[in-house]
Amino acid sequence: MSIQEKVEGYKKTLALFPNPQEKYQYLIEQAKKSEDFPTELRIDEFKVNGCQSQVWLVPEEKDNKLYFKSDSDALIAKGLVTLIASIYSDEAPKDILNSEIDLMEEFELGVILSPARRNGAFSMLKTIKEFSQKLAD
Amino acid sequence: MIKVSDLKKDFPIFDREINGKRLTYLDSGATSQKPELVINEMSNVYSNINANVHRGTYVLSSETTAKYEDVRNKLKEFINAYSSDEIIFTKGCTEGFNFLANSICKDLNPGDEIILSEIEHHANIIPWQMVAEKYNLKIKYINITESFNLDIDHFESLLNSNTKVVSIVGESNMSGMLPDIKKLNSLIREKTNAIYIVDGAQLVPHRKIDVQDLGIDFICVSGHKMLGPTGIGVVWGRKELLEKLDPVYGGGDMIEEVFYETATWAPIPHKFEAGTPPYVEAIGLGAAVDYLTKLDMKNVEKHSDELRLYAKNKLENIDRLNIVHTNSNLAGCTFAMSVEGVHATDVSLMLDTFGVAVRAGHHCVQPFHRKLNLDATFRATGYIYNDEEDFDILSNTIEESIKLLT
């Protein structure tokens, strides 16, 4: 599935929840369902700067594609990073770099996706693109 | 007596709904809401009299200048300064501390000591760290006790002939702690010749302050936390000390005479106010002072004390809630909180869905959070427009949020 298709899928699901509280509950469910994250990977090297809570993103390369493991000490942020990691996992670095999707626009997620540069989601995307750039170089 | 239901009508923002709910604003520790009086006064300046201050020889400029300078008189009365020349306008408390740190410390000797406390806001830590590194000064921190008060014995033990500056919060933005300023002042005078600075960011909006009675040397004040606009604050200082200090910023408006090689400074307060000042913001702050004066700061204080006791009682009854709040009888209406196993950001995001605005993070008090082994807390602060109902809603929605998050 392409990045665009995955975004469309999440967009449809999130649209089912009309108010922010239900959207947060959906993210909390995603966090709880997410794959276990090895605590030894909770290190500075993988920490995403600029989030209000602690967020970790660990890239893995397999057959020229990137995969991301993710974690956070806060539930809602963990839900969000789980979703973002799944969108950009199983993708080629060049496809990630070429994708210009504005998640802030696409997902109406209230204050956690407000279009602020110091926003956590902005930092998560920046980290993913930096990993992709390193691999593409 | 403050009647919140009537007073709220003066604040247009309370007409707003958040997520379909009434706005429960409990983040005045970060910034206060503004009464119509302040908003209208600033709009009046721009609409009717706007011109740069101190420069023009025409009606508009002289009207703006008169209004701007009159704010110093209002503030002089408000904190009982000796003279309106002692009121220095700054961008806010942060600029106030940067100005004081740079101006005071350049005349100190290597090894001289600055005393702060463990629970200071970053604005009262970083400027001192920066100058301490530059001039080889030592910073010492007063311990905070387990009940979130200043350890006075420890403070006494830190005072010596090398102590040159003591800068301590007047009301903690985390634990609500209200140090006994007069007592600290007399200890400082007894044992040192140090300058005593009070961080008034949270104190001045909430309590009647009399700088002459307190006996302190300087106080930094934030305008936007006391109903005024952002971008304006005040440093009050004793005239004889201000006259000795050199300015930190150079530019227009702060000079007497300028030559190609050198310049002489204008008298206080203007020597510290380089460039076009934020005069509209200052006039807005003047309107905020009028509003608070009319309300009477004794009433503001009483309201804060009653609300704090009510809130404390409510919050202490919530299961799993850990509250960072002083055990003193007298404190600010500020509660930093955490829930075991639940992140503060999650709680505050959930509270927002109920229309409840609180702050999450370290509230610019990171070292003390680290000392308590807390990554973050969420914080509720009450002000004149908050009442019991706000804290009822807060405690119910905290309980609701904990359920949703576990």
Image: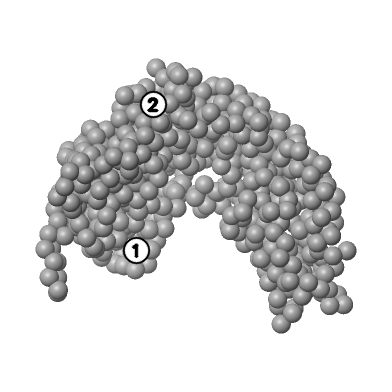
> Comparing marks 1 and 2, which lies closer to the viewer?
2
For residue B339, say whether it is visible: no
**On the image, numbered disc 1 is attached to which residue?**
B131
Name the amino acid type tagged 2: Glu
The first of marks 1 and 2 along the sequence is 1
State the image coordinates of residue B265 (x, y, percent, origin top left). 15, 60
Q: From this viewpoint, which residue is outermost toward the bottom?
A: A137
Q: Which mark is on residue B255?
A: none
Q: Mark 1: which secondary structure?
A: helix
Q: In the visual, does A17 lie left or right of B288? A: right
Looking at the image, residue B213 lies above or below residue B275:
above
Q: Splitting the image into 4 quarters, where does residue B190 fall?
A: top left
Q: Residue at image x 69%, y 53%?
A: A105
Q: Nearer the viewer, residue B82 or B115?
A: B82
Looking at the image, residue B195 lies above or below residue A58:
above
Determine crowd level at label 1: few under 14, some 14-19, many 20+ residues with C-alpha closer than 10 A: some
